[in-house]
Amino acid sequence: DAGVIQSPRHEVTEMGQEVTLRCKPISGHDYLFWYRQTMMRGLELLIYFNNNVPIDDSGMPEDRFSAKMPNASFSTLKIQPSEPRDSAVYFCASSFGGGNTEAFFGQGTRLTVV
Amino acid sequence: GENVEQHPSTLSVQEGDSAVIKCTYSDSASNYFPWYKQELGKRPQLIIDIRSNVGEKKDQRIAVTLNKTAKHFSLHITETQPEDSAVYFCAATDGDSSYKLIFGSGTRLLVRP
């Protein structure tokens, strides 16, 4: 397996634009997590899915953020409209069995909103 | 919810010396405690983990200890090498739900040659 795959690796967008980040988890994993990493706040869990169903989105900062998982092999994180303070590295991770097993992280998407 | 605190924020050691990073957690129901290493510009990767029914675990130069009574756990790296330089994150499950991890703020380790 190629591991967790995220796209794009880098995204630069103007404030107010819609941004969509994509993630393909490891085949067979039943949990998918979206994290945001910044210098100030570290690694923050935004939302996680179990078997494609969103379980906990309490980490989603605002209504401008939304995430979907239409099937077991694909998830998106959307920001609309984007703001400069959304600039961060966004990681997707997947695991088999939830938070008490190893989470495999993707390479991340570095988002810059100007 | 769970709160994980990590210290120190930065650590500089001479090659060959040992490094210790400490974390505390707030929820006594937490039962899984992994450590992740993140090299500059790379993804976090698991280096070692420990579960609540174990007090210590070793893997070559890396060891983790857990004190459930005091609610703290530590990462020990012996015979440090320059390639150990990275940011290390501890984490704990959010109570007994075991479905999500709460990460510490990270420790930037620098191993001086």
Image (tube, rainbow, N blue to C red):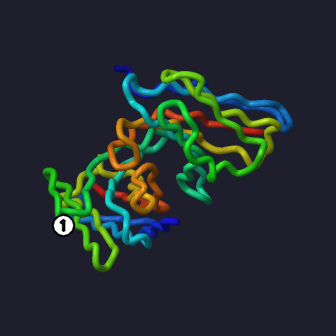
Looking at the image, residue A1 sits to the left or right of residue A93; the answer is left
Figure label count:
1
Q: Nearer the viewer, residue B44 or B26?
A: B26
The three-letter code of the residue at mark 1 reads: Gly
Q: Residue at x 20, y 59 (%)?
A: B63
Q: Nearer the viewer, residue B20 or B65?
A: B65
Using the rendered view, name the quadrant where residue B70 is placed: bottom left
Looking at the image, residue B48 sits to the left or right of residue A55; the answer is left
Residue most toward the right?
A16
Give the chain of mark 1: B
Work out whether B82 lies above or below A64: below
Q: Residue at x 18, y 62 (%)?
A: B54
Q: Nearer the viewer, residue B76 or A33?
A: A33
Question: Residue tagged by mark 1?
Answer: B55
Q: Residue at x 32, y 57 (%)?
A: B32
Q: Position of residue B15 (x, y in %)?
A: 24, 58
Q: Position of residue B82 (x, y in %)?
A: 29, 50
Q: Position of residue A98 (x, y in %)?
A: 40, 43
Q: Residue at x 66, y 48 (%)?
A: A60
Using the rendered view, name the quadrant where residue A83 is placed: top right
Callout 1: 10 Å neighbours few (<14), some, many (20+)?
few
Looking at the image, residue B8 sits to the left or right of residue A85; the answer is left
Q: Nearer the viewer, residue A96 or B45?
A: A96
Quadrant holding the C terminus of chain A: top right
Quadrant holding the N terminus of chain A: top left
Give the structural element (helix, strand or loop) at label 1.
loop
Q: Position of residue A111 (x, y in %)?
A: 67, 37
